[in-house]
Amino acid sequence: MLIKIVIALSRMILRLLADVDATNFDAIPEKGGVIIVSNHLGRLDAALGILMANRGDAILMIAEKYQKSAVWRWFAKNLDAIWLNRFEVDFHAMRQVLKRLRQGEMLVLAPEGTRSGSESLAPDKFGAAYLAGKTGVPLIPVGVTGTEDRVVRSRLKRFKRLDVTVRMGDPFVLPPMERHDKDAYLQQQTDEIMCQIGALLPPKYRGVYASHPRLLQLLDEGVNGTGRE
């Protein structure tokens, strides 16, 4: 119940602070396990996916650095959130997420793990590929612009609304994780995930994946309504 209240209040605040141009959010199923994967420009990114999806079964993950705060600990407990260590493989968190995805819950995840200092796609971790490969749940890529922390601070200080664009692609499913050569599987599927996200972003946001053959192929094919610039 608390998570529904938090989402409703947060959606109201978002409408006051930002003009959000969102496309293809009908791609999110109303129920069933799903992983929404997004680029990570600022603190608003993960919240946007949860708020726009408007599902009450979102798996919330909170960075370990907030465990020292009594307020954050209270929220984590009452929102059934999972603490995540971002700087090493957190097997305990992974097991909890796998269990809840298999139960049909929704996860919003930024595969890069932390905000991009370059404000464009950075080399990412293998977490999203691992979770999708183990559970078989669909992934939905999202490209977000306008949420850079410096932009958010600047506009709000001047009492200007944010201009945020959220482009959602179509769901796709990874092949099952192979028992042998898992590292090669994770690298290949991680690249697939990031290229799917990159295809939804303007060129300047594509970062290290800008010239990746798979991204160029997606753009040439006009995947998710994109086209080669």
Image (cartoon, rainbow, N blue to C red):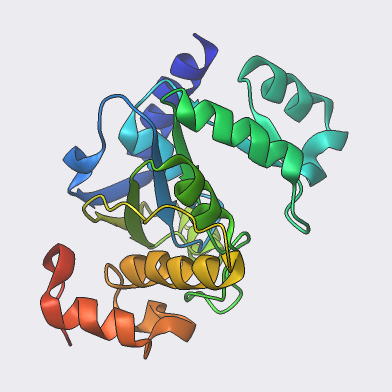
- Residue 127, can we see it? yes
Where does the image place residue 47, in percent across and percent down from the top left? 48, 41
Residue at the limit of the structure toward the right, as seen here: 68
Q: Would you place residue 200 above or below residue 64 in this image?
A: below
Looking at this view, is 17 or 58 the one in front? 58
Q: Residue at x 44, y 73 (%)?
A: 191
Q: Residue at x 83, y 32 (%)?
A: 69
- Residue 228, quarter of the rendered image: bottom left
Q: In this image, 39 relative to 170: left or right?
A: right
Looking at this view, is 68 or 226 the one in front? 226
Q: Would you place residue 75 above or below residue 228 in this image?
A: above
Residue at the limit of the structure toward the front, as seen here: 180
Where does the image place residue 14, in percent across and percent down from the top left? 39, 38
Q: What is the total number of numbered labels drawn onto the structure image?
A: 0
Q: Residue at x 44, y 25 (%)?
A: 7
Q: In this image, 158 relative to 68: left or right?
A: left
Where does the image place residue 197, in percent across and percent down from the top left? 35, 65
Where does the image place residue 167, in percent across and percent down from the top left? 25, 57
Residue at the limit of the structure toward the bottom, as seen here: 211
Which quarter of the figure is the C terminus placed in?
bottom left
Q: Would you place residue 164 above or below residue 214 in this image?
A: above
Looking at this view, is 174 or 24 the one in front? 174
Q: Would you place residue 217 above or below residue 156 in this image?
A: below
- Residue 157, can we see it? no
